[in-house]
Image: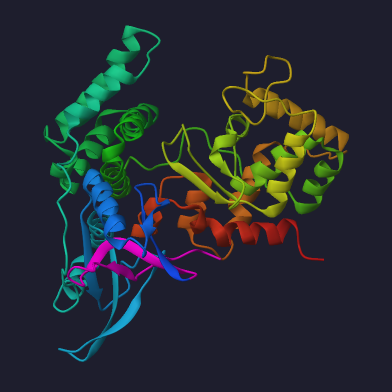
Amino acid sequence: MTRGRRARYVRDPKDGEPVIGLYERKRGDRYDYYHYDDNGRERRCGNSRDPHGAIAEFRRRDAQRKVEFVTLEVASPVAHPQFVKPDLIEDKLHGRKFWSYSIPVEAFAAALRDIAIQPDGPETLAKLTGLPAFRTLHTAPMPEKSVTFDEIRANYEETKSFDDADEMTRSLGMWDEFVVTIGRPETLADVSNADLARYFEFIAREYAAKTRKNRIGKVNGILNHAAAHLKEHRAAIGDFKIEMRTVKQTVKGTTGKALKDKPNPMPIQPAEFRKLLNVASKKWKALLHCALNMGLHPSEAGMLTVDDFDFDVRTYRSERTKTGEWRAAILWKRTIKAIRDYMKSDEYRESDGGYLFLNEDQGNETPMTRWNVNDGMKTLRKRAKIRKDKLTFDSLRDATETCGSIGNDSGAVDILMAHALSTTNASPSYRYRLPEHTANVVATLEARFFPPK
């Protein structure tokens, strides 16, 4: 079941006004007070036995975050975050009913931007923003200015490791070409869709297919690097990437087929997966369950760390190095059991790096590489007498994506696979990429591979 964020706020005893962003939950003879941090995690501030101290602690944390909150009443649930549990209230002035809830202003702006780029976006926004559709009831301090292009470039140059000076020159040259083509704006917020379209038209006109892909990929890579290091601007960079991807799809010559078509997905079948489990060691049972439950590539499976798991609440959350996006997942009980059985066995060795699966041929600090994982899968497949040569470790990931998407929101699948959110499902709630968002996907996948007897 997906946990919802309550819409009931703590009220300040001094004036009776709600403290926006601070929630209360009944616990015995008192109320616990809590809020959510920038990663969507619940943070407790205190309880009703000392409301003044709890409110003061929340406001101290909130001031450090510099996040603006806005409480809205809306006549349409278009921008409604899925993790909010709203109260249905009646507008006495107009005699109409509205949904009432609070979300960060950045999330609300992202929702409006997603609506605006649709074919009927202007008409839809005209309806949504007409009174009494939206009404600002409360605001806190405004967030800081958007990240600048110079900051992104300087961060990449200072924190990125290069094999040689030529590689650095090529990378920064592609970034400078992008900035010059879109008109040398100061910040990401200054870039319009027309500016982005001008860049993609230039790329399509001047370069061959492979070169176009490399140059666009390099720009995205620099943005991903900035999102990983400039964490206070991660949301703004994520929104900018969504706009880039949307504009790119409208420009001819930038979205054609790749020069080398990717192979068709080869999802593993439930019967084949059970055969592998029957001959697998405790280490490989844990590895197989993790890969299927979370849609992992071989390299990602080898780099799993114990600290990214919360075994008590059965969740996993970490940042994917390749895309810069966060993977979040609800874990099956059988996955947790397989990991715990493995960690109690003689096969498991602890490491200072916290890696879950170590390379058996190396020391205690070397995680499994993708080659170790792929070779181990081949050995396991032969032992299970599965004759499909095309059945690889990636077949587990293919099964996660194809089977988990049946009847589910593609945005939830994106979160589980650590993909960037597409514009059609990048709702404000999904920007937090919480494990709870994947609950239905992993439940569908579990029912497919482990049907109830």
State which quadrant residue 80 falls in.
bottom left
Which of these two is toward me, 202 or 75?
75
Residue 307, percent from left and from top: 55, 36
Quadrant (top left/top right/bottom left/bottom right) for the N terminus: bottom right
Quadrant (top left/top right/bottom left/bottom right) for the C terminus: bottom right
Residue 220 can be seen, yes or no = yes
Is 6 covered by the magenta stretch? yes
Is 123 covered by the magenta stretch? no
282 left or right, relative to 243? right
373 left or right, relative to 171? right
Q: Which residue lies furthest to the front in this view?
A: 49
Residue 358, percent from left and from top: 67, 24
State which quadrant residue 100 falls in.
bottom left
Q: Which residues lie in the magenta part?
A: 1-28
Which of these two is toward me, 122 or 346?
346
Residue 242, percent from left and from top: 31, 47
159 left or right, relative to 345? left
Q: On screen, 423 above or below 216?
A: below
Which of these two is toward me, 424 or 443?
443
